[in-house]
Image (cartoon, helix red, strand yellow):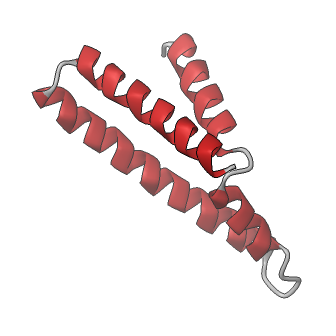
């Protein structure tokens, strides 16, 4: 296993998920005293696993048609645009 890739992906996704709408929604569900916290944890984890699987599948399929270098450019521009929109709305 390539630990550098593993740790890079883990750190990137972990930081991106901190404080986002997904985490806030999970905290809202967990605040209900009558709901089992393990159920919330496993449901939220399963949702993130499925979303990640879709991302991996989509990336794999796109890599068959678009050069990896251009995918990096597209992702970079996408993140920049999201940042600009966030700053404008702030």
Residue furthest to the left in view is 65
Q: Quadrant of residue 77?
A: top left
- Counting from the top left corner in percent of width and height, residue 84 is at 54, 37
Instruction: Give the side of residue 26 with respect to residue 61, left or right.
Output: right
- Residue at image point 53% right, 54% down: 48
Establish if 72 lies above or below 53: above
| Closest to the observer, 27 or 71 | 71
Residue furthest to the front in view is 88
- Residue at image point 20% right, 27% down: 63
- Counting from the top left corner in percent of width and height, residue 54 is at 35, 50
- Residue at image point 78% right, 66% down: 27
Residue furthest to the right in view is 33
* Count of numbered circles in the view: 0
Instruction: Give the side of residue 49 with respect to residue 62, left or right.
Output: right
- Residue at image point 60% right, 29% down: 12
- Counting from the top left corner in percent of width and height, residue 62 is at 20, 34
- Counting from the top left corner in percent of width and height, residue 8 is at 58, 20
Instruction: Give the side of residue 55 with respect to residue 11, left or right.
Output: left
């Amino acid at each position: 296993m390539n630990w550098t890739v593993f740790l890079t992906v883990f750190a990137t996704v972990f930081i991106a998920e901190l404080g986002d709408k997904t985490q806030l929604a999970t905290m809202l569900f967990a605040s209900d005293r009558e709901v089992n916290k393990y159920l919330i944890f496993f449901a939220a984890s399963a949702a993130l696993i499925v979303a990640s699987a879709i991302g991996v599948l989509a990336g794999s399929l796109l890599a068959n048609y678009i050069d990896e270098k251009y995918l990096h450019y597209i992702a970079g521009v996408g993140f920049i645009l999201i940042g600009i929109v966030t700053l404008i709305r702030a």
